[in-house]
Image: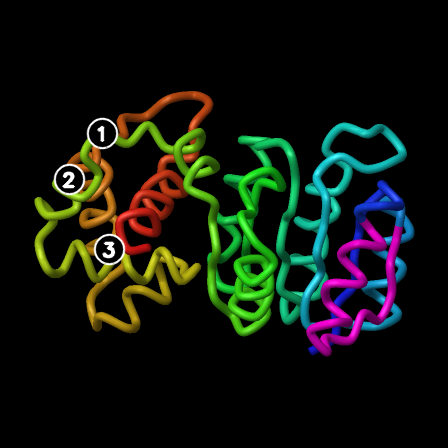
Amino acid sequence: MRVVIGEDSVLMREGLRHLLEEAEICVAAVAGDAEALMTAIGDHRPDLAVVDVRMPPTHTDDGLRAALEIRSRWPDTAVLILSQYVEERYAAELVARGARGVGYLLKDRVAEVGEFLEAVVRVSSGGTVIDPEVVAQLVNRRHAQSALERLTPREFDVLRLMAQGRSNAAIASVLVVTEGAVEKHISSVLAKLGLPPTPDDHRRVLAVLAYLEANR
């Protein structure tokens, strides 16, 4: 496994490098700002990018926006966000682009080295690791499990495929139904999960996050 680290704190950056190398994971490059991170990803094409949310030049959400670009330009590179913050808008978009090979952990909630390394391996292998606190901030989920239990088997299949990042056309192909039927199932899923239309929320993403949380 080859990893690129994007972290502006020298101590944190070198600490991550040390942890990964101690676990015999190759650190191909490290970067202290979003531009250097993108250059390193392009040069090394790693299996995984470990990225902080707030990086230079603006110290706001540069790292997370870089992660979105990485997923767009190099979809085979998995992304693990490791941050002190939950940036709701971009975190939701990151998952919306495909839940496979995506992780979002809060630094102060990573309990032990083994837990972090397990997340690194899982995400780099195409798995998903989303911190429960991140999910709690992204999903207004009251009794999500019971809500999921109200779905029909076909609606649950549609939601499961949505969580894999499939488009409506791809879901229709897998289930051998029309796209119109898929759209009706999705509308029913959103209604049963209590996700009415709003101008700000990505309802499809929130439904996927509810599914991921309930199936942790």
Q: Are marks 1 and 2 in contact (CB under 8 Å)?
A: yes
Q: Of helix, strand and loop, which one carries label 1?
A: loop
Q: Is residue 185 above or below residue 158?
A: above
Q: Nearer the viewer, mark 1 or mark 3?
A: 1
Does the magenta-highlighted stretch encompass residue 14?
Answer: yes
Q: Position of residue 55 (x, y in %)?
A: 81, 37
Q: Does label 1 or label 3 sit earlier along the sequence?
A: 1
Mark 2: give few (<14), some (14-19) or many (20+) Cα within 10 Å.
some
C-alpha distance separating marks 3 and 2: 19 Å
Q: Quadrant of residue 33?
A: top right
Closer to the chain start, of discs 3 and 2, is: 2
Residue type, label 1? Arg
Q: Which residue is mark 1?
A: 142
Residue 105 lies, in percent from the top left, at 56, 46
Residue 166, numbered label = none
Q: Position of residue 124 (x, y in %)?
A: 59, 69
Foreground of the two, 148 or 215: 215
The stretch in magenta equals: 13-31
What residue is drawn where x is 22% and y is 70%? 175
* Residue that numbered label 2 is attached to: 147
Q: Looking at the rendering, in which quadrant would you find the C terminus?
A: bottom left
Q: CA distance from mark 1 to mark 2?
A: 8 Å
Q: Which mark is residue 182?
A: 3
Q: Are marks 3 and 2 in contact (CB under 8 Å)?
A: no
